[in-house]
Image (tube, helix red, strand yellow):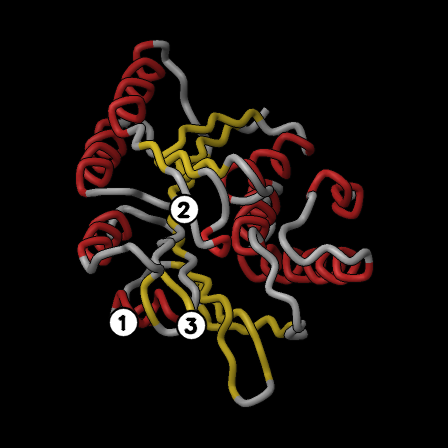
Amino acid sequence: MKKVLIINDFVSYGKMAGRMMDAILSYKNYDVFFIPTALIANNFSYGKNAFLDPTSYLEDTLKNWQDLGFTYDLIFIGYIANKDQRDILISFINSLEKKPFIFVDPIMGDNGSLYTGLSDDIIDNYRSLISLADLISPNATEAKLLDMDLKNASKSYLITSKNEGDSYFVEGYDKDIFRVYFEKLPSNLAGTGDMFDGFIILNLLKGLSLKEACERSVKVISKIYKLNMDQGSNQSINIEKYLNLID
């Protein structure tokens, strides 16, 4: 059984972040370990929120699991809340005797700017983590904020939400650059980026190439997105309802 460690935020209301990814991977019988980097009451779009910082829990849990001898085939790092978490994760990854596949999604912003409440410090935090990654998946805004020459970095990447005119696509690199086009839909559902990360992990651990994993992920997400819109939901996706589409 493949083992996946998810390090990401936990949102109490709405299927997104770590909860979304856990549902996808558990459905296909992957052994999922999930440590929250932040406990968040709800999606930021509601305009009011509550937070809890579990940095000490992150550090204690990683140490506990090392003491127990747990190992992982893949480690996913999504939202990180502060420099302390960054340093904990870097130290943890560097201490591993056998390095698993490291997948980092630098969750920082969209539509040209950082998310509300985030400072520029988060950019440097992610730059440090990305240096240890095998795969990164920023959206177009995050790729620009990181200001990295990805094409010359010898690192696999997926840049989501790119567009040229009316054409929207994911740009990927894995030895060669490729594009996977998709239809831009009018609704803006929370959790679609987390769903993408979950499907990418699922398909990579099946042994597919990055391009194949991206193509399959985009295809099933488009189906789920359209079905969700047809049923009138415009907040988030109840992913368990659609997991049979993976099979």
Amino acid type at circle 2 is: Phe
> Which residue in the protein does label 1 denote?
149
Q: Residue at x 53, y 69 (%)?
A: 170
Going from N to C along the chain, the mark reached first, 1 or 3, is 3
Q: Residue at x 81, y 56 (%)?
A: 231
Residue located beneath label 3 in the image: 111
Check the image and report above or below for 46 versus 243: below
Task: Report crowding for label 1: few under 14, some 14 to 19, many 20 or more residues within 10 A (C-alpha).
Answer: few
Of mark 1 and mark 2, the one earlier in the sequence is 2
Q: Residue 123 location in percent, x, y?
A: 23, 58
Position of the C terminus by quadrant? top right
In the shown orientation, is residue 126 left or right of residue 212?
A: left
The amino acid marked with disc number 1 is Asp
Residue where numbered disc 2 is placed = 103
Identity of the residue drawn at 33% across and 48% down: 133
Secondary structure under tag 1 reads loop
- Secondary structure at numbered mark 2: strand
Query: Label 1, label 2: how many angstroms apart (C-alpha)?
Result: 18 Å
Q: Name the kind of residue labelled 3 in the image.
A: Asn
Q: Residue extending furthest bottom? A: 165
Measured from the top left, where is residue 160 in percent x and y?
Answer: 49, 66
Q: Give 46 or 177, whichever is nearer the viewer.
A: 46
